[in-house]
Amino acid sequence: MNNFGFVLAAYTIIWGLLAIYLGSITVKVSRLRKEYNHLKEYLADKQ
Amino acid sequence: MNSQYEDAFSQDHIGVKILGYVLLFLMFFSFLLIAWYAPVERTMGLVQKIFYYHVPSAWVAFLAFGVVFVCSILYLTSKDKKWDIYAASSVEIGVVFALIVLITGPIWARPVWGVWWTWEPRLTTTLILFLIYVAYLLLRYFGGQNDRTAKFSAVLGIIGFIDVPLVYLSINWWSAEAQVHPQRIGMGPEMKAAFFVSLFTFTLLYIYLLIKRVRATHAALAVDELREQRDE
């Protein structure tokens, strides 16, 4: 692999890891939001 | 019926949105500086460009673990849960950036040193730093959501920080013969400009990720509160 390949690999890994991390947080909050709304409705109906 | 953490599900504050757009611009701008403004280094060639992300990633890891250190002390002294949340969130981000350092370092090292890895002081202490905070995450994951886990985590967060100055000062404390990691890197003005813009960008990125991660924790706590109400 020439030097350009090493640089490309490094940059891809850096931005890939950061995108995956930020994406995982976003997905997590989205799922929690759905569950939160569902629980709120359930508790409202229960009352 | 509503959780005290319900705000976690509302829209981002305008400041956070602006920070996000500024970050997008800075990431693009710093890439342009690195790719076209900073010259190709004479000895190492194109592969030296990894430096502009490798070193800022290390800086962010140190910053993140420094925040963990401070927040852990504040948690142990005040018992205020918010410091525990900040500490745990910062550890995660620090581990991500430490992982970036540990991956980009060998990718840079291979063409320059001829080896992917060597057990020299800076690399070894950086790996230890990474493992300490992975241990923190494992403790939190397997210890459960309780005060005891939070206290033990805070202690680990404080003790683990001892390795940060070790990593940074390793190039001074060990003899030059024992090291392959460069002692100092000389930079021309264009390189300095690209480096400091990248450093600033990564610092803002840390702040942005911390805000997002704390928010995710608040969202999880909000759901936990409603689950408890449901199960009553």
Image (cartoon, coloured by chain):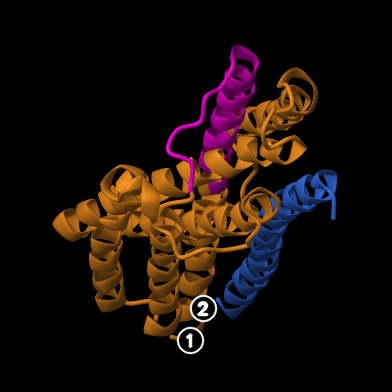
x then y, percent, for residue A42: 63, 76
Rendered location of residue B103, percent (x, y): 62, 59
Q: Colour of chain A?
A: blue
Image position of B191 (left or right of B87): right
Chain ID for label 2?
Answer: B
Amino acid under label 1?
Answer: Asp
- On the question of residue B4 being in view, the answer is no
Magenta residue check for B23: no
Circle 1 crowding by C-alpha within 10 Å: few under 14, some 14–19, many from 20:
few
Horizontally, is B228 left or right of B190 in the view?
Answer: left
Prevailing secondary structure of the magenta residues:
helix
The tag on residue A31 is none
Report if the CB atoms under discs 2 and 1 are less than 8 Å apart.
Answer: yes
Could you tell me which residue is drawn at 38 percent across and 68 percent down?
Answer: B132
Give the residue displayed 48% in from the left and 86% down from the top: B231
- List x then y, in percent, for residue B109: 62, 52
**Residue drawn where x is 51% and y is 39% of the image:** B207
Residue in the foreground of this view, choosing between B109 and B2: B109
Magenta residues, as a range? B181-209
Q: Chain of mark 1?
A: B
Q: Which residue is mark 1?
A: B231
Residue depicted at 62% across the width and 47% down the height: B10
Horizontal side of B221 relative to A6 (left or right) equals left
Q: Residue B205 magenta-drawn?
A: yes
Q: Nearer the viewer, residue B114 or B91?
A: B114
On residue B227, which mark appears? 2
Chain letter corresponding to the colour orange: B
Q: Quadrant of the C terminus of chain B?
A: bottom left
The quadrant in which residue B75 appears is bottom left
Q: Is B119 drawn above or below residue B194 in the view shown?
A: below
Please name the amino acid that badge 2 sits on. Arg
